[in-house]
Image (cartoon, helix red, strand yellow):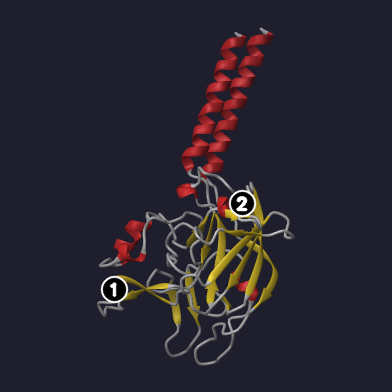
Amino acid sequence: MKANRNGWRLGCAAALCAGALAMGCAAARAAFAEAVVSYHPGEGYAVEFGTGAGYTNATAALGAPSRVTVDPDPNWGGVFDVTPFAPPYRKEQLISLGEGGELTLRLGAPVRDDPAHPFGIDFIVYGSAGFVITNGDFSGGGVTDGSLFGNASPGSTKVEVSEDGVRFYELNPSMAPVFDSCFPTDGAGAFGVPTDPSFGPGDFAGRDLEGIRDLYAGSAGGTGFDLAWAMDETGAPAALAEARYVRFLVLAGHAEIDAVATVVPEPGSLALLAAGLTALGIAGARRRR
């Protein structure tokens, strides 16, 4: 009887564990930056239209990306949804880096190098780039040709990562895209879920907002990066399992950052683990009977 009872307990424990994993998977959330380690604005950083005030409040990069823009201007302000056509633009939302600028952030949870992440992407940077409306309809029926505005120039940015905040590794520039570029943020999407990086701006030509969202497939956009791209001083793979710090550098022009998010694991991976634990518990119970 004791063996049966122990088997039953093991089966129940495995089932409860599997259920907890499944619920944890459903409740999975991206982690965002929690602290500014260092910031140097560089030369030629962005300034606010009208006031000339610099986008130099580094704490704007902390927390989740913007879903709406709240503009208090009495004449043309209001509350505007952030979409790929209407990116965030206020200095309270964005930090700007000019040429020679640098921003180092500590994340609330480590970025983990996981090939099972969607498209192999491990973290996402959200900026202020947007798709240009080319049909002249700015009232909700806009269509783009895939061209961007407010985006950083190709080859003008660099990203480095670190486990301890002391030794940093550059993400291979032949693989790492320019941040504050494609894909413009969609505040209606899921943060921490990457857009398919095989798409380029031209794939969005002729699409309206719903057409863009079809390609985003539930993602909130942003520029995705893979920790596996980290390399040491010799150019060899750094083989980092995780990183807690991310450093952004601008080599030319300027670029803006709204937020950084770790990638949320795909639901299927945790669900499979939960199912496996359940099966293991049932098998163990049967053996003890």
Front residue (pair 132, 171): 171
Residue nearer the viewer, 75 or 248: 248
- Above or below residue 100? Residue 114 is above
Which quadrant of the figure contains the N terminus? top right
Q: Quadrant of residue 201?
A: bottom left
Examine the rendering and report whether any part of residue 11 can be seen: yes
Q: Where is residue 250 drawn, in percent x and y?
A: 57, 73
Q: CA distance from mark 1 to mark 2?
A: 45 Å
Q: What count of labels does the image hold?
A: 2
Q: Residues within 10 Å of mark 1 (few under 14, many from 20)?
A: some
Residues 150 and 14: in front is 150
Which residue is depicted at the point 72% across and 60% down? 165
The image shows residue 96 at horizontal and vertical percentages of: 57, 77
Percent across and percent down for residue 180 are 49, 70
Q: Nearer the viewer, mark 1 or mark 2?
A: 2
Residue assigned mark 2: 236
Amino acid type at circle 2 is Ala
- Residue visible at 47% across and 54% down in the picture: 193
> Which is nearer the N-term, disc 1 or disc 2?
1
Label 2 Cα neighbours within 10 Å, binned few <14 / some 14-19 / many ≥20: few
Residue furthest front in the image: 234
Drawn side of residue 232 relative to residue 117, left or right: right
CB contact under 8 Å: marks 1 and 2: no
- The residue to which callout 1 is attached is 142
Identify which residue is drawn at 43% across, 67% down.
184
Residue toward you, 39 or 232: 232
Q: Is residue 95 left or right of residue 177?
A: right
Amino acid found under the numbered disc labelled 1: Gly
* Secondary-structure class at tag 2: loop
User: Which part of the image, by quadrant, shows the C terminus?
Assistant: top right
x and y percent of residue 57 in the render?
Answer: 63, 78
Q: SS of the residue at dot 1?
A: loop
